[in-house]
Amino acid sequence: RSASSGRPDGSAGDTKPMTATDIKVNVSIPEAAERAAATGADGVGLLRMEHMVLSTNKTPQQYVDDHGEEAFVNTLTDSMRTVAEAFYPRPVRVRTLDAPSDEFRQLEGGDDEPSEHNPMLGYRGIRRSLEEPATFKLQLRAFKKLYEMGYDSLELMLPLVTDAEDVHRATASLREVGIDPEKRDWGVMVETPASALCIEELCETGLDFVSFGTNDLTQYTLAVDRNNGTVADRYDELHPAVMGLLHDVIETCREYDVSTSICGQAASKPRMIQELVDAGITSVSVNVDAVHDAQREAKRVEQRLILESVRD
Ligand code: PEP
Ligand code: MG
């Protein structure tokens, strides 16, 4: 790996307002990495692994059946490496597979997907990875390969975690493939109400960070399907019930010295940035087009906080 693409110090140039809060970017596909890196974002807050799989048009199982395990690992490695290279040495947070079965069903091999009445509450995220350890370990092997190549900037994130038991089982798999969780940066999405309510136990697993997936956290907290237009007017990421969970998690994580982030769509809403920067969130990750606005908004809040502390 080389530091040729990013600036060696990880900064982004003179135009970027310096913020104490890291402003990161969500990267959808590896091909978008260069443009995302050029925004001067402080790293990638969310790179979804399922896009790397969906772009092959085959389910992971079908891909492995057709091309073998090594080829599957290499596909993931190449995609992750493209992003890690574009941002190096800025951190890149990659999330393990989280495609609901109805999305996998569209792919070659999708006929084998379970038929689920409600896929969003079903077989996805970490719960699927724990049921299919062979596929999970192929994902983890891609991380391991990149660590061995020197991409120490990679962070590993687990989706749809509900409790510490999920985390203990996942870190056991990490160890089985030869990744030492003590030596790598890893964490979980907080996107189920359960994970927010069990945050102390999660912090005690030794994770380095949590990241709020407000797209899911909102749908599960308010019981409003995020893809159902009929109830869309009830879908409110700034609802006091959701905000209360975010505040509680940030407070607990600060006690445990666990860093906090938000990578759901709501991260680009000015009021969300205001509240969470005010609460002491470590980083905010937004879509590429929202990076500069988020930097300015965070800066505004930080300046106000400084002024208030001087006045007190
Ligand atoms: C979220 O739930 O907010 C999130 C970022 O994950 P996804 O949108 O992939 O479910
Ligand atoms: Mg989610």
Image (spheres, rainbow, N blue to C red):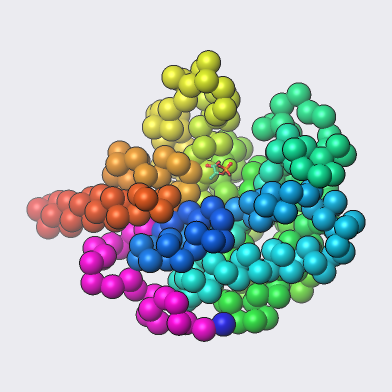
Does the magenta segment cover residue 266? no
Task: Specify whether 301 is left or right of 21.
Answer: left
Q: Nearer the viewer, residue 164 or 260?
A: 260
Q: Nearer the viewer, residue 154 or 220?
A: 154
- In the picture shown, does residue 237 fall above or below 208? above
Quadrant hosting residue 35:
bottom left
Which quadrant of the frame does ligand 2 lie within? Answer: top right
Q: Residue at x 30, y 39 (%)?
A: 271
In this rendering, does residue 299 appear at all? yes
Residue 10 place in picture, x, y as percent: 39, 75
Q: Nearer the viewer, residue 233 or 110?
A: 110
Q: Residue at x 30, y 55 (%)?
A: 292
- In the picture shown, does residue 275 fall above or below 257? above
Does the magenta segment cover residue 11? yes
Q: Nearer the viewer, residue 211 or 41?
A: 41
What secondary structure do most residues of the magenta stretch adopt?
Answer: loop
Q: Residue at x 56, y 61 (%)?
A: 30
In this rendering, does residue 101 appear at all? no
Residue 57 place in picture, x, y as percent: 74, 49
- In the picture shown, does residue 53 fall above or below 7? above
Task: Specify whether 209 is left or right of 61.
Answer: left
Q: Which residues are magenta?
A: 2-23
